Amino acid sequence: MQPTIKPANPNFSSGPCSKRPGYDVANLALHTLGRSHRSAIGKQALEAACVQTAELLGLPEGYRVGVVPGSDTGAVEMALWSLLGQRPVDIFAWESFGSGWITDVTKELKLKDVRSFVGDYGVLPDLTEANFDHDVVFTWNGTTSGVKLPNGDWISDTRTGLTICDATSAVFAMEMPWEKLDVVTFSWQKVLGGEGAHGMLILSPRAVERLETYNPPWPLPKLFRMSKGGKLIDGIFRGDTINTPSMLCVADYLDALNWVRAIGGVEAAIARSNANLAVLENFVAQTPWIHFLAQDPAQRSNTSVCLTLDVTEDQVKSIVKLLEKESVAFDCGAYRDAPPGLRIWCGATVEVADLEALLPWLTWAYKQVTA
């Protein structure tokens, strides 16, 4: 029988992600629209985005937060091009985006002293291979594989190199050991359901020291430059952005931060993501034809949950089309480079009730294509 109850919000995309519950664009503070981002109120809004991010995340003293161009990708590229080259580099990858950083470092920056550690979709590479006298580059959560780092215990407290972490689908959804992370990047359109094109760059004092004492041997585009004359361009981390941001997107991000504060802070946001994952864990445990791509339960993402099905690739595509046709789940197919399956976003902006309403439809769609 076809189910009768549909999710109130069928948006399960892994980016851009679902807006927060109760979101209404009419409620955004739009007094900055039509004003220069360099005006007093423009800078005030941008600085608020940086300050409130640091406060909500509980960043250690001395960590800086900046709004940068190009979404999470732009933030990662700024870090790679500006910081690498002084030391050997270790890169850990277990899905498409981590593999992309390997390509950038080896084929674009053309660094020679690079070690790459790559895990197949569903598993982590051997983290014990990391040499923390090197700079170490990694994602925290594999958005296209559904595999996350279970913790930061593998990162040395006595490291001499930098740790550069792409955490776009982890920040505000997973506990982050900030003291072990020197560079962290994320984007508004992931966990908080914000708008695209803007990235967030978090730097530790050690990363700032690198920027002020090291000049890479290659030309740096203006958009990547974070230091001048041996000093950090501190304005970037106080609302004086490198290029012109969308003030509408800034207002949208501040609304998302206000929501996180209202529900109880980052701990509450993490709890919401964990509760959403638990809904799918219970379903998978009771359903023989569906499985987590992540092989170790401790490494299962609680945001980008990736699932494989006991059907053909064409049948998976048919299931995705059926779910979209019935308006019960949009944009839930696996990433193009990942094994065929489903990818269901479970970040904090998703409601448990919507996931629970989705599950009977998954069973119905599976039976439709396998009948």
Image (tube, rainbow, N blue to C red):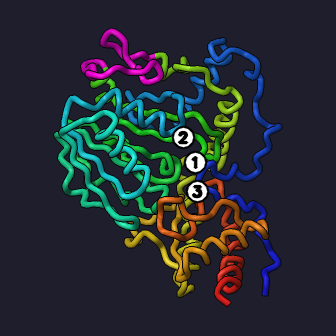
Q: Is residue 124 visible?
A: yes
- Residue under the image location 73 percent in, 21 percent down: 32
Q: Position of residue 136 (x, y in %)?
A: 27, 43
For numbered disc 1, what is the local secondary structure? Answer: loop
* Magenta residue span: 212-234
Q: Tag 3 or tag 1, which sits nearer the N-term?
A: 1
- C-alpha span from label 1 to label 3: 8 Å
Q: The C terminus appears in which quarter of the rendering? A: bottom right
For numbered disc 3, what is the local secondary structure? Answer: loop
Q: Is residue 224 magenta?
A: yes
| Mark 1 touches mark 3? (CB < 8 Å) | yes
| Nearest to viewer (mark 1 / mark 3) | 1
Mark 3 closeness class: few <14, some 14–19, many ≥20 residues within 10 Å: many
Q: Label 1 is placed on what type of residue?
A: Lys
Q: Label 3 is placed on what type of residue?
A: Gly
- C-alpha span from label 1 to label 2: 6 Å
